[in-house]
Image (cartoon, coloured by chain):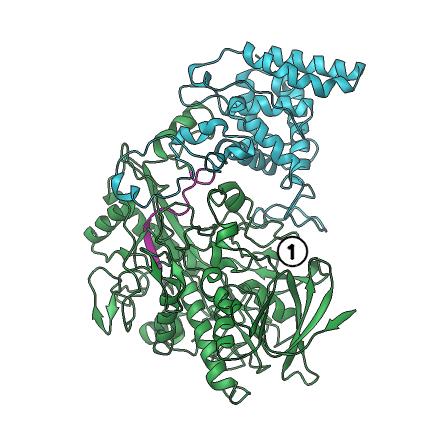
Chain colours: A green, B cyan
Amino acid sequence: MTAKLKEVDVVIVGLGWTGGILAKELTEAGLKVVALERGAPRSSENDYSLPNIRDELRYVVRHDLMQNTARDTITVRNSPQQQALPMRRLGSFLPGEVVGGSGVHWSGHTWRWTDMEFKIRSNYEEHYGKTFIPDDMTIQDWGITYAELEPYYDGFEYTAAVSGNAGNIGGQIQAGGNPFEASRARDYPLPPLTPILASEMFTDAARNAGYHPFPRPSANASQPYTNPDGSKFGGCQYCGYCQRFGCEANAKGSPHMTVIPIAMRNPNFELRTHSWVTKVLKDSDGKRVIGVSYTNVLNGEEFEQPATIVLLCAYAINNVHLMLLSDIGTPYDPVAQKGVIGKNYCYQTGAAATLFFEGKYFNPFMNAGGSNATIDDFNTNWAFDRAPHDFVGGYNVSGGFNTPLPIGYRPVPSGTPQWGSDWKRATAKWYQTAMVIGASGSVMTNRYNCYDLDPTYRNAFGQPLMRMTFDYKNNEHKMGGHAAGVVNDIAKSMNPTRLNPASARTDPWTVVPYQSTHNTGGTIMGTHPRDSALNKYLQSWDCHNLFVIGANVFPHNSSYNPTGPVGALAYWTADAILNRYVKNPGPLVQA
Amino acid sequence: MTEQKLDRRDFLKSAAAGGAAAAGGSAAIVTPEIAQAEPTPPAATAVAPQAAGYAFLNLDEAAFVESLVDHMVPADEISPKGTDLGVNVYIDRALAGAWGKGERLYMQGPWRQGAPSQGYQLPLTPAQLYRAGIEATNAHCRKVYGKSFDRIEDAQRQEVLVGLSTGKITFDNGLPVRVFWTTLYQTVIEGMYSDPIYGGNRNKAGWAIIGFPGIIAVHRDHVEKYRGKPFPNSPVGISDMS
């Protein structure tokens, strides 16, 4: 027996960064908003406090803040010829499942994606001709421009306390920043973090090689900060426990200590935790949605929550799953290349080298989420000619560390035994005296990389799991080879005592080990319902009162972390809803 | 050292056969004597011998795990041996607890082996996997060396671990060796390097191996102060700060 609840103006599915931003913006404008979050309420004071938050086993290895795959997961395969099997535990990526979502356990890396991505097909055709793009690479323009999004990037950076050096203010290149970034109206709200030795050494080596290193912009407050909404940040403690942990210092920009508590104080807002949305409900003619069905996972009780507007703000994968389960839009068919829901799933790739310097103490355990220095010369830079290397996309390279905690990180030179006294001596010698240089690379779309519903496996609610078909293609292999070459050249120029060189990845994508929680696509934005699920305002082409927000709207993936545009697009959508949609409900773009 | 363990296990087994109630109580009494009887290298002298007291492992499994962790983590100038670090205790508690019982593991069929890229696909919880893997490894050891893993020579143990880690050994019971080895290895690492509240990394001697300082509250001022210099190696754990 499903209880039908009283209609509200807006129901939000999932309360992380995007749901939190929309909850705050829409309730402040007077709309009645209910948020349904499948996870538990958690707070910095009670859950992310010292000493318990400094627990690598609990948070990194056992995934305490992450989605529980016993209840719901996906099936995976590398090609349509393969039988998909369930991802029985998390590995390659880690969707969050608490109030605050993945915005609690991210590292804070915040990038502004530019027109290089938003106009990708136009750009490459213009630079290299139509035939440069392989036939099966389904990249397409996003239908939005950097200029449109700039104020919303700014809003997100100031909300999340991004620390960094601007590279381009009003068209003027700034010393110490990323000279390849697009023009910004003003600087970051906070100066960059204190560099660590590894990032300084990388910076010197990269500069000597003729590249343009800069401190990675990150939502780790380099000093105490109060954002424009009045949310208070402590300064980063460089504790080394950033990615996969909540921040006890409230120094990492996270929704649970910024936008969500502001919404919570507003009487227009109601949060229901442990509430698992199973379906978006359509009205009889299929032109609108009328609300959502959800289950209280504490007792199994089922509810229907009617709403005038429905916002899907779950993790990127789960947003696509809900669209498929709810039969909204036409599912994508990779053979006929028709339909849109499930299309253009993308991921990221990379190559990394470990450098060993005898007697040099890097103290890897002292770092912020964004302590690394980065170069963007092979990414947002048309002067890097892709033609001779024959790939679309790019990669950024950084030097430093990434969660260098001891269960997961004890680097030793290749050939070291895996156990015994010699192994122990090697870990003792090199743990503190090694550093990493890594490339993070884009992944272009391919017609066969996509999602659909699995025919066999089901979740705890009896619904089909979503099936992910994904593998790296030649384009990524070629880019990986180039990236490994650049990484190794920089590494060798630093004269390490020993070097484990980077190598291009050529093996299939695997569900283990951890790679990155940067899954994109599935319900992509675009200019026409023929080839996209959403218009530029992230509004469903099929049901005009449904908006889907998250990295699932990205038509392809770049080398950058996704949260910058995810946050900016949430503000952009809030603006479109309040200033356009509410005044005149209907399609904001005519098909 | 191996002979003493053999004696202990045989004693316990015969005691159990004579009167089942004796076994549980005896383990706690016997273990410290064994520990004390072993030559203790300098690095281990600060560590008080401690009865393990197992919540999951049976006698054969306990003997396997103890000999495994002492082989992989021998006592030397770097650290005490695996059992003195409590790695065996960590493993027992992990297998007895939620993780061992399959928490967060999607356990619905149908079951297919799949490609390596599809990850873990066995219809076993980690505890069941461990149990089956120890049984299969001991069966292999008995077939090849005539004795179980804990009773063979050190060089033979080395041979077995190399065989497991490279997949040269295959199990007669069909259990995939690499899956067992991956789990086995990961749990040994966790027992060395997780916070001591989980039973391993006793006295933070695992962290001390690599100079990991533990859960320092604030490194803000240390970034400049210790740039390029070693940080004091006196690790802090969760219980120290609680």
Query: In the structure shown, which secondary structural element does the residue marked by tag 1 occupy?
Result: loop
- A186 vs A439, nearest the viewer: A186
Q: Is residue A428 magenta?
A: no
Query: In terms of image quadrants, where is residue A82?
Result: bottom right
Stretch in magenta: A394-409
Query: In terms of image quadrants, where is residue B161?
Result: top right
- B217 vs A380, nearest the viewer: B217
x, y percent for residue A272:
62, 65
Is residue B123 shown above or below A391?
Answer: above
Most common secondary structure along the magenta stretch: loop
Q: Amino acid at mark 1?
A: Gln
- The answer to whether one can see residue A288 in this image is yes
Apparent side of residue A508 relative to residue A416 in the rendered image (left or right): right
According to the image, label 1 marks what residue? A83
- Please identify the quadrant where the N terminus of chain A is shown: bottom right
x, y percent for residue A423:
43, 28
x, y percent for residue B217:
39, 42
